[in-house]
Amino acid sequence: MTYSVAVSGASGYAGGEILRLLAAHPDIEIRTVTAHSSAGQPLVQHQPHLRSLAHLTLQETTPEILAGHDVVFLALPHGQSGQYTDALGETPLVIDAGADHRLTSPDAWDAFYGGAFHEPWTYGVPELLVNGAKQRDSLRGATRIAAPGCNASAVSLSLAPGVAAGVIDPGDIVSVLAVGPSGAGKSLKPHLLGSELLGTANPYAVGGTHRHIPEIRQALAAASGASPDGIRISFTPVIVPMARGILATSTAPIAAGATDAQIRDAWESAYAEETFVQLLPEGVFPRTADVLGANTALMGIAVDRAANRVVVVTAVDNLVKGTAGAAVQSMNLALGLPEDRALTVNGVAP
């Protein structure tokens, strides 16, 4: 069976990456692409690397144009998806790459986003531990999926095994991330100009203000079956001059009595059978260069007994495993297709 697909926000980075992956998917027909200010223009004017989709023209983003497809992807700025999802009740599968349907708590939404709160959808991180199982169990047959925030999924995947196994204390997590500016979207912003980024590293959303914090707390609480109130995290992202990629370094105190072997076993047991989340050998840590273009999260862990902390370093491509790859992987599960269809573990080098 071939599924018809519409992608909104197709002129942006996330929409373009969704299209790049879907263009190689044998079960998908990309029928409609939409945008706002660039509607009426050829898709390749905004995504010149997508040569196989040169026949497509960007249309207006309206519920009427998005309706009538088997699958709709929404790659819109935060706060804009809800107006369309409410009107797509007849669409068999809708996947939101924005934040509108990620959070379960209206209070958390008000504190970090504001505006209308929309119902939470099935979270699109298949490998994430949830009460002793994996999130993929909930994604099979799902009709509404919230793709993750890129930073949030990197940190959640990094720490969920330790939280679930009880070998780390989730009440004192510290995460510092080096991130590429593509995660901020394609809109022109002075602080993201090349002249402002090259040769420097710039922290942002410092002091507990980043919007992915409640998403991380929610995911880690689900891994342990506890309340998000028990998850405390100091989260600091730093923009660095690379177009793509996240290198997340997360630490947490070692739980009383946890041995080095138990700590490593928590991560090995969680990810031993996973294709797209891979734990590296002891003493080996990932580089962002190794995941560019791939749907992989590569992870290394260390036990720092002097500081009494576990250190987890995870690399992802923010546009693939962090966003579009997670969305397509989740779509495959929802439709009953092979989970890895149109996705690769191989990066691009050099």
Image (cartoon, grey):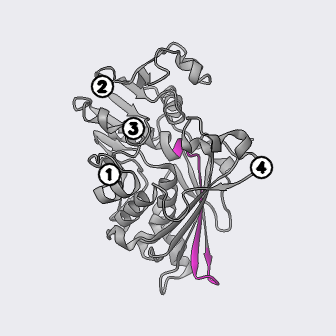
Residue at coordinates 50% horizontally, 77% vertically from top-left? 262
Contact check, label 1 and label 3, Cβ < 8 Å:
no
Residue bounds of the magenta highlight:
303-321
> Which dot, 2 or 1, sits closer to the camera?
2
* Residue identifier under label 1: 137
The type of residue carrying mark 1 is Asp
Helix, strand or loop at disc 3? Answer: helix
Residue at coordinates 53% horizontally, 15% vertically from top-left? 42
The type of residue carrying mark 3 is Asn
Q: Quadrant of the C terminus?
A: top right
* Residue identifier under label 3: 332
x, y percent for residue 105 = 30, 58
The type of residue carrying mark 4 is Gly
Give the mark count. Answer: 4
Contact check, label 3 and label 4, Cβ < 8 Å:
no
Task: Tell me which label, 3 or 4, sits earlier in the chain.
Answer: 4
Q: Is 310 within the magenta?
A: yes
Q: Which mark is residue 337?
A: none
Nearer to us in this view, 223 or 66: 66
Q: Residues within 10 Å of mark 3 (few under 14, many from 20)?
A: many
The type of residue carrying mark 2 is Pro
* Residue identifier under label 2: 63
